[in-house]
Image (cartoon, rainbow, N blue to C red):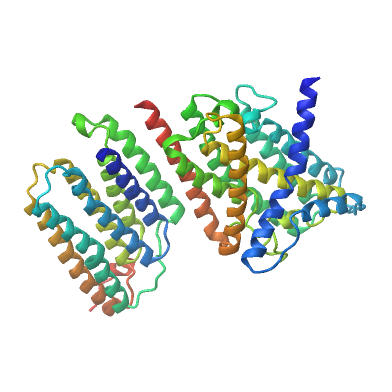
Amino acid sequence: MSGEALNLLIGLAMGLNLLALGTSRLPSLIRAMSAQGMLLGLMPLLLEAENLDWRILLVVLATLVGKGLVIPGLLRRAMRAANIEREIQPFLGYVPSLLLGACGTIAAVALARALPLLPEHARSLLVPGAIASVLTGFILMIGRVKAISQVCGYLILENGIYLFGLLLIHSTPWLVESGILLDVTVGVFIIGIIVDRIQRAFDSLDTRKLTTLRE
Amino acid sequence: MNLILDLVLRLAVWMLLAPLLPGIINKVKARVAGRRGPPVLQLYYDLAKLWRKGVVLSTLASPGFVAGPAVAWVALTGAAMLMPLGPAGSILSFRGDVLLLIYLLALARFCTAWAAMETGSAFEGMGAAREVSYAVLAEAAIIAAVLSLSVQTGSVSLVTMLSPSAGAGAVLLAAGLFTVLLAENCRVPFDDPNTHLELTMIHEVMVLDHSGPPLAAILHGASVKLLLFALLLVQAVLPTGKSSPLVAAGALVAGVLVVTVSVGLVESFLARLAFRRVPLLLTTAFLFCLFALLVAWKGGAE
């Protein structure tokens, strides 16, 4: 039963991947990314439903607050501070990136069946979900012009890696998980500052303009 | 003898009930906007009026101008005869009839576009171009939906495909098919049936030069198509084959009503999309159907 619920959550996360690829608005991209982070944050509760202890609860809570509130808050603040237009400018159009993401998802599902997984992981969508999220992150990082949407791509990529890490939930110390979460938060914090600097130095967040040197 | 009676009865049901749906949609839209709205039977009055009128023919038009709507109407009615009606089954069922259904719908569209271009007016050609370019994406979605149903049931005949529910992917399939229904029938996020601004019309601009009985055939054919898609959606999602005939028939009627009312609600609460955004929505519908196919395929293998 918990496997079914887990698969449903991962299916939702895969849907959010496609939403992130198809949306043309920066705020909804940030919303999709943070909703996905929160969904993934809930998963340890389902995986470890038998032996819950306070450390797991703490990490779950920290993930929810970090990915659901702090990181999107930081990104929104950076957006406001740098006066970014809300429209995402794609290198790769929405329809091609959506189709690419869908192909990636299907390939991930097909590929995961060919992988030598443990029998208890064979039926779960954990591995396809992880691969699909990593692919989505790549497409977003490569195919978008604005620095902020590339950050969102990076965070979705991180979500995918986290999902993959859930396979090893019994052998990863919770300290590592919380360390990663802290790193990501600090990373986004710093990126927020950098975005502001880029905006001041170049009058634009278009990463194509960062290739020209200036005094 | 029995067969002929069945055929006549079915034809009568389709002919008489189909124009009800646009009436219900208009009534819902009027109610939401706080108006009283036209009577539910308005389309019947319109059809009767159009049938009595004469036809204005352009001197440029070939016989195809009248033949187009006629062939389209016959193709749509033929497609309707293939569609099973819940417990009553379908009159003509064979292996692969679903492919014929898709091709009949395509034939109807081709004939409407052909007749639209007969008068040589620029507007009609523009509308036909738009209609056909949307259709490319909508057809991909409907083929994916049909494939997922066929993988689910291991059959390519409509009666067996539509009698069980679509299983785990039913929600995905319903979302995809509903979007396709809106696109194929030129409803709001894609096209506005009420607009008469030449530059934004799609279906309406294609039929701009038709009058009298050919226009009646086009309007009636459009309502048959709406009923066809509503029935396809409802039967794909609900397990109509499992329950007793009475319950199944009730569920079918209720389902079609729900679909019709939701079309009206969508039309009341959504604005139509900008042209450049339409392919994105249609691609999303295609992906919904594709993922339903994925679920059917993966679920069937385990």
Q: Residue at x 61, y 46 (%)?
A: B135
Which of the image's four quarters has the N terminus of chain B? top right
Residue B124 in the image, given as x and y percentages of width and height: 75, 56
User: Is B244 located above or below residue B203 in the figure?
Assistant: above
**Rendered view: B78 above or below A64:** above
Pick the front one: B187 or A150: B187
The quadrant where residue A131 appears: top left
Q: Which quadrant of the figure has residue B81?
A: top right
Q: Residue at x 32, y 44 (%)?
A: A8
- Residue B6 in the image, given as x and y percentages of width and height: 76, 27
Whole-percent x, y for residue A138 in the image: 29, 52
As drawn, B38 above or below A7: below
Q: Is residue A56 left or right of residue B272?
A: left
Q: Residue at x 9, y 51 (%)?
A: A174
Q: Give the side of residue B255 with respect to residue A27, left or right.
A: right
Q: In the image, what residue occupies the spot 68% across and 43% down?
A: B225
Q: Is residue B119 visible?
A: no
Asked if A77 appears above or below B75 in the picture, the reply is below
Instruction: Decide if residue A97 is in sight here.
Output: yes
Q: Quadrant of the C terminus of chain B?
A: top left
In front of the other: B195 or B81: B81
Asked whether, in this view, residue B286 is left or right of residue B294, the answer is: right
Q: Nearer the viewer, residue A56 or B243?
A: B243
Residue that sits furthest to the top in the current view: B1
For residue A151, what is the image quadrant? bottom left
In the rendered image, residue B239, in percent from the top left (x then y), is placed at: 52, 33
Q: How many marks?
A: 0
